Amino acid sequence: MSAEQRRAELAASLAEVRARVDAACRAVDREPAEVELIAVTKTFPASDAALLADLRMTDFAENREQEARDKVAEFTALRPDADVRWHMVGQLQRNKARAVARWADVVESVDSERLVRALDRACASALDAGERTRPLDVLIQVNLDDAHGRGGCPPAEVVTLAALITRTSGLRLRGVMAVAPLHGDPDMAFATLSGISRQLRDRHPEAGEVSAGMSGDLESAIAHGSTRVRVGTALLGGRPLTSP
């Protein structure tokens, strides 16, 4: 497929996704501008991200540090003047904090005190080294189903973790993130997340972001107050059965 054909394909998919977001917002009397669209580009090439940037996409998400690091560098070479943000949305090991601090604008998968401390140290080092110019925006990933390997902070511990984040110098608390249970009711999950978000905002008004909803359930997430939807398949197409 030529670059022109891929651009046309992505443009059509982007229009469809934006139409879904608009319709979902209208259904619950929200403004579409309240919901940010994030392109989940994991396993797809930097050239796709570059084409989406040409189509005015500004936010991209990755879930593996090494893939993201290389992709961000390649994207920057392809579109050096593009004003975009890169989100880390996958589970993050503490030993990857230093590397992530070099390229990520947002980490949406913060779920433990040890990771908070590691990211804070990493950001301080990156700021001192001139590798970044501002603190790292973070969201607390909330575990809504206790599924093994999904990651996330237990709901009862969100307030405590949030308080720790606000005491750091390198991190800025922006809100919460969650993934709906694989075999559960997304409406119930996102309603729970909405309640957790309200409790968090009562204590930290600056933490108003709710990152929830993907290709298959973004309408439900928007109905329950999501401010960010993370879309991969509906935007970029199907992924290989196994990731490289």
Image (tube, rainbow, N blue to C red):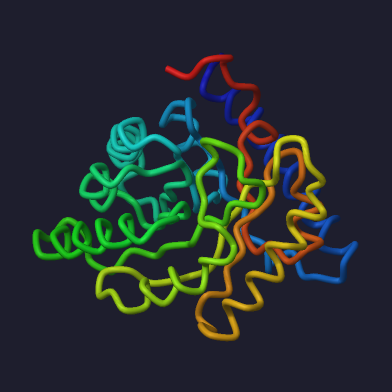
- Write the residue at 26% across / 69% down: 170
Position of residue 23 relative to residue 197, above or below, is above
- Residue furthest right in the image: 27
Image check: 12 left or right of 168? right
Q: Quadrant of the C terminus?
A: top left
- Counting from the top left corner in percent of width and height, residue 43 is at 47, 25
Position of residue 4 relative to residue 139, above or below, is above
- Counting from the top left corner in percent of width and height, residue 104 is at 34, 51
Position of residue 16 relative to residue 193, above or below, is above
Q: Nearer the viewer, residue 98 or 164?
A: 164
- Write the residue at 52% across / 55% down: 141
Image check: 199 left or right of 58? right
- Residue furthest left in the image: 129
Q: Quadrant of the N terminus?
A: top right
- Counting from the top left corner in percent of width and height, residue 21 is at 76, 53
Q: Quadrant of residue 26?
A: bottom right
- Write the residue at 40% across / 57% down: 112
Image check: 242 left or right of 11? left
Q: Nearer the viewer, residue 185 or 7?
A: 185
- Write the residue at 49% across / 31% down: 48
Q: Quadrant of residue 161?
A: bottom left
Q: Nearer the viewer, residue 22 or 98?
A: 98
Q: Quadrant of residue 241?
A: top right
